[in-house]
Image (tube, rainbow, N blue to C red):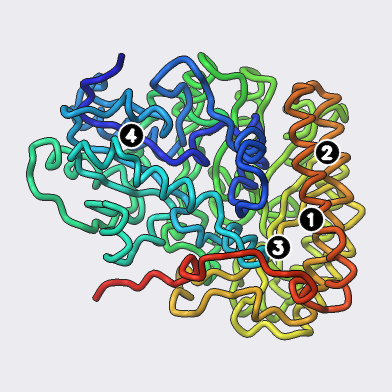
Amino acid sequence: MSHGHKIVLTADKTLMSSYNGSMFIGFAACFPRVLPKWLYTRVFCPPQNKWSDNVDFAPAGLRKIEAALVESGIPQNEIFVAHPDKLSKAIDHTTRVVGVTTSDPLGLGPASSTFSSLLRKEPYTAYFFRSLMKNPVLRASGAKVIVGGPGAWQLASEHTRRSLGIDCLVEGEGEQVAPPLFKDALAGNAIPTRVEGTTVPVDKIPMSLNPTINGNVEISRGCGRGCDFCSPNMRTVRHIPLERVLEEVRMNLKVGDRITLHAEDVLRYKAKGMVPDRTAVAELFEKVCGMCDNVCMSHLALSSALACPKLIEDISHFTGADGGKFYVYGQTGIETGSPALVSRHMKGKAKPFEPEKWSEVVEESFKLLADNHWVPAATLVMGLPGERAQDVDMTIELIRNIRPYKSLIVPLFFVPLGQMKENEFFRAEAMMPEHWVLLAECIEHDFHWVPILMEELFSQNRLSAAKASALKLASWYMQRRVKDNIAIMKEGKDPRDYAPPLAMDPSAFERPRAEA
Ligand code: SF4
């Protein structure tokens, strides 16, 4: 029994999972509630261990907060990191603070709001966050509830925070602001209802003390390309020194068997500008791959790949992908095929190339990555302010052109963030006929490549037979639900006009209002 912890850190079920070993599957955790719950849980966010109350692996952001609290003098044994299903074993009358990290608490993030708007169903992320916050053990404990994480912006409304029982919301980077907050809450002092995080200098970013989901190790923080629709937190780039990265890798490998190098653009680790530092990134991969056979990355920029093709070869060599047995996976952003929209909203995206060349950069980069056995999962943004039918047509053409390259394409609706936060959410109801055609193209692209990717994962023994069957079943179920609609979409029509809509709570799309 693990009672007696003054601080409990947790997250909703969609974040406290190793996603069957694939961050791509984790991305799909923001699906709306169209799959049966048992199938969704088994495929997208199975719990990690059944026997222990403490979790073996936690989201990287939660581990950083845990480390910051310990570094500030709070004893490690007063902090307990719990799976949301095990809160009754973690929280009791001695618990003073519960810290929750969240990525998508109301389902308003780009992926979940897109899928749920299209399918008129609440996203699982919102459902499980609400379940966590309404947990009777948490509610009865009297502990102060502090919520932070990348989805904190969705909780800006005081009404929402009150209704979910949140005492304090931390927006932005939390490592410097969390320790005094938690200490005040431990001492029974009043805490503010909202706190703005600070940009943490690289030497103040604490090292994680315990393993993260899928061995996620942060190598850089921030991006610096400055897209209008991106979070302001991304402005300042900081690179974690190699020795510290390797120490976190070693710590993770004591329990886990895979490493995910995390940055907004892994290829720009230690780069001084927009061209990768080939020596620094190659050294990073050589060292990490020397310690672990299963190394992947979170994100890469297509322009960085094309700016340094030799680095792509290097990484394929170090990861073993050049033998053709494995693939290097990573998420990336295409966003649009329109040079006008790139120039208007994301000038830095193509650097060191010109924004007008963006479509060529995407195509050539996809070819380069495919030649080197990489599989990018790329996002698009539909409904960017000022997007015209001809802009969407250019994106359609681009998606057709990259069809031969093994990849996934995920079209997302515009979400007002960063400098564009005063704009409106884009919704399915605002889709032009061209958007429906684009959506159909993306679905066809993915239906072409997903079965091939699953077969390969299975044949590489990276997936057990049971998990492969569950994945195939989920894929078959989704294809069955969508396939008939593709022909309608290709005519530029909304397929939902031809089928009875599924129920949805429209308040899920109410934009949180900032407080005065
Ligand atoms: S490239 Fe990606 S992470 Fe960087 S500013 Fe643009 S949207 Fe944000």
Q: Residues within 10 Å of mark 4 (few under 14, many from 20)?
A: many
Residue occupied by mark 4: 9
Q: Residues within 10 Å of mark 2 (few under 14, many from 20)?
A: some
Q: Secondary structure at mark 2?
A: helix
The quadrant where ligand 1 appears is bottom right
Q: Are marks 4 and 1 in contact (CB under 8 Å)?
A: no
The residue sitting at 78% across, 38% down in the picture is: 473
Residue occupied by mark 2: 453
In the image, residue 364 lies at what x, y percent?
A: 84, 57
Residue occupied by mark 1: 481
Spatial separation of the CA atoms under disc 1 and disc 3:
18 Å
**Kind of residue at badge 2:** Leu
Residue occupied by mark 3: 411
Q: Residues within 10 Å of mark 1 (few under 14, many from 20)?
A: few
Q: Quadrant of residue 474?
A: top right
Query: Closer to the observer: label 2 or label 1?
Result: 1
Left or right, 376 with reference to 262? right
Q: Secondary structure at mark 1?
A: helix
Spatial separation of the CA atoms under disc 2 and disc 4:
35 Å
**Kind of residue at badge 3:** Pro
Query: Closer to the observer: label 1 or label 3?
Result: 1
Left or right, 73 with reference to 62? left
In the image, residue 94 lies at what x, y percent?
A: 16, 27
The residue sitting at 31% across, 14% down in the picture is: 1
Residue 277 visible in the shown view = no
